[in-house]
Amino acid sequence: MILVTGDNTVGLALDSVVEAANRGEIPVLTLITTTPNKGTLLDLGADFYEVGKLQGHLAAKLINGDDPASVPIENVVPEVIVVNKRVLSTLKDPRRLLKEIVENADAVIDENGKEVKNLKK
């Protein structure tokens, strides 16, 4: 199994990583959730759209005069889960996805490569 983290260099070359993994019938998991049908088995990462909205609300509070010392520090990272069931049939060793993961996914690519559950906005 190959895990691609948030590294920009590898992220930019993700197609090459997935292509090499496909030749070896190895699953690829990432923390990059921007493109659901890129050939990875599972992507789990931040919903940067939601992160941007949260940052905008915080900036508005400060611009409108809230005391920065009164603003609590929060560790908030809204998650996005993307599952690609089509990849399962290409792997050397049989794998399965937990029902709970698929049910809670924001995007699901079915066995035919069709996106059946869209990313939330």
Image (spheres, grey):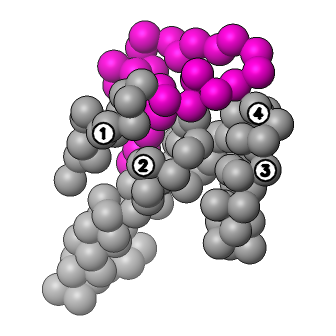
Q: Amino acid at mark 4?
A: Ile
Q: Is residue 54 above or below residue 106?
A: below
Secondary structure, mark 1, is strand
The residues colored magenta run: 77-104
For disc 3, the marked residue is 20
**Between marks 2 and 3, how big is the CA–CA gap?**
19 Å
- The reply to whether the C-beta atoms of the residues labelled 2 and 1 are less than 8 Å apart is yes
| Left or right of residue 52, residue 15 in this image | right
Q: Amino acid at mark 3?
A: Ala
Out of 120 and 12, give the one closest to the viewer.
12
**Between marks 3 and 1, how big is the CA–CA gap?**
23 Å
Secondary structure, mark 3, is helix
Q: Residues within 10 Å of mark 4 (few under 14, many from 20)?
A: many
**Between marks 3 and 4, how big is the CA–CA gap?**
9 Å
Secondary structure, mark 2, is loop
For disc 4, the marked residue is 26
For disc 1, the marked residue is 115
Out of 33 and 79, give the one closest to the viewer.
33
Q: Is residue 85 above or below residue 50?
A: above
Q: Earlier in the sequence, mark 4 or mark 2?
A: 4
Q: Is residue 88 magenta?
A: yes
Residue 42: tell me if it is visible: yes
Q: Residue at x 32, y 37 (%)?
A: 114
Q: Earlier in the sequence, mark 1 or mark 4?
A: 4
Secondary structure, mark 4, is loop
Q: Residues within 10 Å of mark 2 (few under 14, many from 20)?
A: many
| Residue lying farthest to the right in this orientation | 24
Q: In which quadrant of the rendered view does residue 35 lie?
A: bottom left
For disc 2, the marked residue is 36
